[in-house]
Image (cartoon, helix red, strand yellow):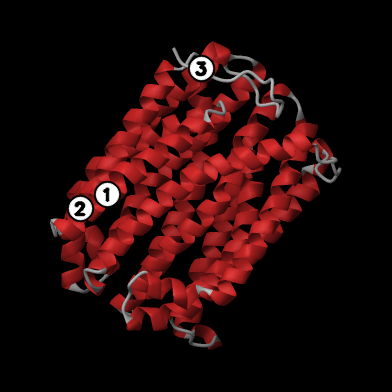
Amino acid sequence: MQLAKRILHLALPSIATFSSMTFTGLLVLMIVGKLGAAAIAVVGVTNILIYNMWALCAGIQNAINYLVAQNYGSGEMRLANQRMQIALAMTGILGVILLAGSLLAPELILSAMGLNDEIVALGSDYVMIRMIALIFGIFSGAFFAYLRAIGDTKTPMTIALINSGLVVVLTYVLAYGKYGFPDLGLQGAAWSILIAEIVTAGMCVWVYFGYLNATLLTRSFERFDRKQVKLMVFESAKLSMMEMSNSLGMLVFTMCISRLGTVAIAANEIALNILSFGFMPSNGFGAAATIGTGQEIGKGHHAEAKRFGLMTVLLGLLLMVLISILMFVFALPIAKLYTPERAVYMAVVPLIHLAAFIQLFNTTGIIFGGGLRGIGDTTYLSRVAFVLNWIIFIPCTLLLTVVLDYGQVGAWIALCGNMVFAALANGWRYVKLDWSKARVKSGKASAPAMVSH
């Protein structure tokens, strides 16, 4: 019972954080949806593009999350702070690259995806603003990762809720010119995200360098050790490779659907948004698994670390059963919440049914993956993501949509298959690992590695 309480203490605020992001996406899509199917399509395509760009930076956040969790468990917070400072420097470099790309590449990217002229014209400025907003978002993500690693999941939740409220309110008033604000249409939705991300990043800086300094000395600069820089770069690269494999798979998935027309793109975006509701508890419990296993490994409690992950999977699946049933039963009413266009919401219903079925596998894969990340088994995770996406998901998507012409249902069958294989691969690895050999990542070449039976 104590273990379950600890898991829920870590998971529930994280679920609320991810929920706020998902509900924000839902409300923004509903607000923008009144501007027409083309606007929905632009938002959908941009979300995939931003996800791919975020994946380049996500490795830094994921590395900080599990490395600091291990340091927190072992009481090595000076090392944790040094790693965080290295992460912020790396994030700054990526921010400069994103800024250059936001000014030079949006129209070229949309055209290269094979989108029609209407979507390219409408979406270029929207993509540019979203890319600039992402720069602030990746800094906030690094701060969130640090806070979760030390067991503080409530502060990221609070900041995320403020961010969500700002985005929704500003999208409404800027997209339609309410209360004396300018009528910016679709671009208003992009500006609302940029403003909210700037405010969020500012709050994160205040939290990290402000009240955390009293207990964790976060304002004390730690001289960068070459071994720690190397460790951060390699761990971030592996985890970014994992996220990039996933995001590029989704990019190909989106490109295959984009050739089917505006209605198909809009239906796909709505279905992905609905599927993201399943990611809320999955990612929340996955984050808890990373934190809990990482901290237990830091303490040298190997059996407790393994048990923490297994219990987290059980709790996550219990919740997902209920969510999946509700999604399946109320598929049509849910689809109608997004759009009044019959062609769009009827195309969404079978995709929701598929999403409801696959969420149990997706949850299992995410939580086991979170546990594996907590013990630093990042090489395995990156290899699995690469193999599954480039050997199974992408070829199957192309086969079912382009060759066999099964349309968006074919693409979603490929997506579901990828999630099933990921769950099986991560679950098998988690059970088979020799947990007694798990060690805290030190950054030294002589550090023991995890091995399997």
Q: Find residue 273 and report its horizontal and vertical position in percent.
A: 35, 57
Query: In front here: 163 or 119?
Result: 119
Q: Of callouts 1 and 3, which one flags the residue occurring earlier in the amino acid sequence?
A: 1
Q: Of callouts 3 and 2, which one flags the residue occurring earlier in the amino acid sequence?
A: 2
For residue 451, the mark is: 3
Residue 47 higher or lower than 129, as above or below: above
Amino acid carrying mark 1 in the image? Pro
Is label 2 in contact with label 1 (beta carbons under 8 Å)? Answer: yes
The mark lying in front, picked from 1 and 3, is: 1
- Pointer 1 residue: 395
Amino acid carrying mark 3 in the image? Val
**How many angstroms separate mark 3 from mark 2 (CA)?**
37 Å
Q: In the figure, residue 440 lies in which quadrant?
A: top right
Q: Give the secondary structure at mark 2.
A: helix
For residue 277, the mark is: none
Residue drawn at x 58%, y 52% as measured from the top left: 57
Residue drawn at x 42%, y 46% as measured from the top left: 280
